[in-house]
Structure formats: structure tokens, C-alpha cells
Image: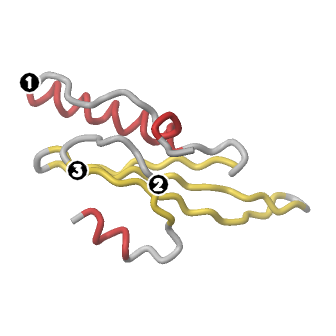
Amino acid sequence: RLQESLKELEEAEPVDIPLVGDESLAFVVTSTQKMEDRDISVSLHVVDFRRGNVLVRVGTTAPTALASVDDALTLARQVDERILRVAGQPSGTSTPTATATAAP
């Protein structure tokens, strides 16, 4: 179901990430924003995941030169851990970063 929602976002580029929750996906949208007299490339990294019947979207925005999906992935894992704690279940999310698992 999450993959279908990604197809609706024309400007989004999929990003490979380790699994978060029961189902997950990540994407990045890059745009240009004007700051004073300069154009700056800005990236929005989003991680969507599902844990049971809970759907979560986590996003981080930063200048493209500094942006990484790992920041959104870290936040998504923290939310997932919280969901598991509240549900009384042991931790289930692995800890590799997207950057470390990406193909060269």
C-alpha cells in the first residue's frame, strides 16, 4: 500500500532504506528556494512506515549538500521503538543506516 502512494508523487525519487516497522519506504524531493539573492537546493527526505495498524510519516529538510535520508531514518526508528514500547513488544528495528547499506 505504501508503494502505491509513492507512485502518486511525481517529483519524488525512491530511496533504498533498511526495513522500519512491518512495511516501509523512503523518498526524496528536491527543490530550489530563494534566500536573499541566492538560489539554494533543498531536499526533503521522507520515511513512511507501518507498524501494525499505525501509519507514520517522518520528514527532514536540509540544504541538499547536507541532506541525508539517514536523519529521517533515525527519527522513524525512534518512533517505531516508541510504538513497540507502548505495545509492550520487544524492539524489532535493525540499526544500519541507508547510506551504509546503499550500493556503491
Identify which amino acid the numbered label 1 is placed on.
Gly
Q: How far apart are marks 1 and 3 (CA)?
A: 19 Å
Whether 36 is drawn above or below 21: the answer is below
Whether 17 is drawn above or below 86: the answer is below
In this orientation, which residue lies closer to the viewer: 90 or 19?
Answer: 19
Q: Which residue is drawn at 91% across and 62% down?
A: 37
Asked where in the image residue 78 lies, by quadrant, the reply is top left
Identify which amino acid the numbered label 3 is placed on.
Glu
Identify which amino acid the numbered label 2 is placed on.
Val
Q: Distance between the residues labelled 2 and 1?
A: 31 Å
Kindly identify which numbered label has been placed on residue 15.
Answer: 2
Position of 63 with respect to 43 (left or right) is right
Determine whether the residue tagged by mark 2 lies in a helix, strand or loop.
strand
Foreground mark, 2 or 1, reads 2
Q: Residues within 10 Å of mark 2 (few under 14, many from 20)?
A: some
Please name the residue that numbered disc 3 is placed on: 23
For the C terminus, the image quarter is top right
Kindly identify which numbered label has been placed on residue 88.
Answer: 1
Residue 51 in percent (x, y) is at 18, 44
Q: Are marks 1 and 3 in contact (CB under 8 Å)?
A: no
